[in-house]
Image (cartoon, grey):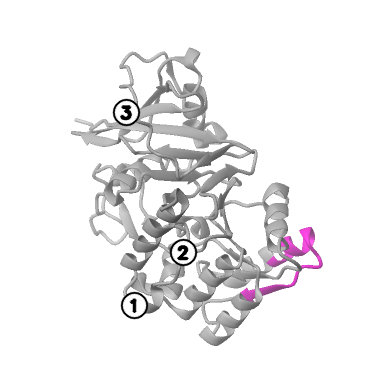
Amino acid sequence: MSRRAAFLAVALLAIVGACATPSAALPLPEGGTLLLVGGGLDNDTAAVWRRFVQLANARGPGRAVVVTAATGPEEIEATDKTEALRTWAPELPVEVVRRATSTVDTVAAIDRATALFFTGGDQKRITARYRPEGRATPEWEAMVRLLQRGGVIGGGSAGCAMMGLHMLEGGRSAQALGLPAQPDADGEPVALGPRLGGGMAFLPVGLTDSHFFERDRLGRLVAAMLASGERFGLGVGEDAAVEFDLATGSVVGLTPSETLLVDAAHARREGEAWVGLRARVLGPGERVSLRAAAMPQPPRPVPANVQHEVPVVEPGQNRQLASWRLFRQAERPAAGVVQLALDGWVVRACADVVEGWSVFRIDLVRRP
């Protein structure tokens, strides 16, 4: 069996196992593209919109559908994304599918389309509408058909978070790592550990997260990766995007705003620390295969002696991009060990022996 066939077979088995009905046992798309946008997408982010339009028209005249299931005020996002597409591609027909759109009309719109774009909001609304409890629906099957015929499915914020077999449903990093929190607004205790559910199963490998650097979501991504058994994690920053090619299994950065790829092939938990982690920042044009075999050697331990402490100044961009600075600095061997202290947890990182990668660990810091 070829490597590609083996990859597709494993991914197909994962999708079939995650779904509850025979209709879900569709072949995994061998073509098609996923466009993952980390949220906060501006209408003038040319790299994202132009690439979406290019992929929509890749096999002839395109047709797009904007899917607003995740969004609370659906009409606002329907107008915003439709007008953005009209700006970049006035000739591209655009339809809007809402939560209340019937199954018959939704399937017909998707079967006419070459491209879908999921708006932001709450990713649980997407899966509840189109893949409830991991079950196939006619709408989900139509989306898979779109990918099979070489189309593109993109999504921002919630539309990025729902792409994989597993999906982060919310929560903060501190609580995902096990740090207790104050009761919520209703006085109920906040559950500890990563909040995971079933995703839309478009991405055959990896766990995705959005608003990543800006909301310090590294901790919850790592905790969720170890809990779900996913080797790869994609933390997509705001106004950032990556493209995943289903035919080749490669991911490439598209935008000046960047994405963190985490490799947990050798990761493990040691008490109140998560160790054995590698990461790489994906800038525009940087490409990595998610079919690659695990690096044979575990990453070296991160030394305890810190050369640079990443400062955090409230409020503003310094605070929002502190974890991005940590990884960009740490990937340079001359930087030594770089550390970032967050709310009850600390990240320590340094350059890996593999060029372009860093190694890192997360430690809890419990207050007395």
Looking at the image, residue 159 sits to the left or right of residue 207; the answer is right
Q: Residue 219 appears in which quarter of the rendering?
A: top left
Classify 10 Å Cα crowding around label 1: few (below 14), some (14-19), many (20 and above).
few
Instruction: From the image, tell me which residue sits under label 1.
Output: 21
Depth check, mark 3 against mark 2: the one in front is 2
**Secondary element at image label 2:** loop
Q: Residue 353 appears in which quarter of the rendering?
A: top left
Q: Is residue 166 visible?
A: no
Classify 10 Å Cα crowding around label 2: few (below 14), some (14-19), many (20 and above).
many
Extent of the magenta region: 82-96
Question: Compared with residue 117, is residue 7 higher up or lower down, i.e. above or below?
Answer: above
Asked if residue 258 is among those painted magenta in the image, a careful observer would answer no
**Secondary element at image label 1:** loop
**Amino acid type for the residue under numbered disc 1:** Thr
**Amino acid type for the residue under numbered disc 3:** Pro
Measured as percent of width and height from the top left, residue 235 is found at 47, 44
Instruction: From the image, tell me which residue sits under label 2.
Output: 28
As measured in the structure, the alpha-carbon distance from the residue carrying label 1 to the one carrying label 3 is 39 Å
As measured in the structure, the alpha-carbon distance from the residue carrying label 1 to the one carrying label 2 is 16 Å
Marks 3 and 2 close (CB-CB < 8 Å): no
Measured as percent of width and height from the top left, residue 302 is found at 33, 21
Residue at image location 45% in from the left, 60% down from the top: 162
Considering depth in this image, is 265 or 117 the residue closer to the camera?
A: 265
Residue at image location 34% in from the left, 77% down from the top: 21
As measured in the structure, the alpha-carbon distance from the residue carrying label 3 to the one carrying label 2 is 31 Å
Measured as percent of width and height from the top left, residue 23 is found at 40, 78
Disc ID at residue 176: none
**Amino acid type for the residue under numbered disc 2:** Leu
Disc ID at residue 298: 3
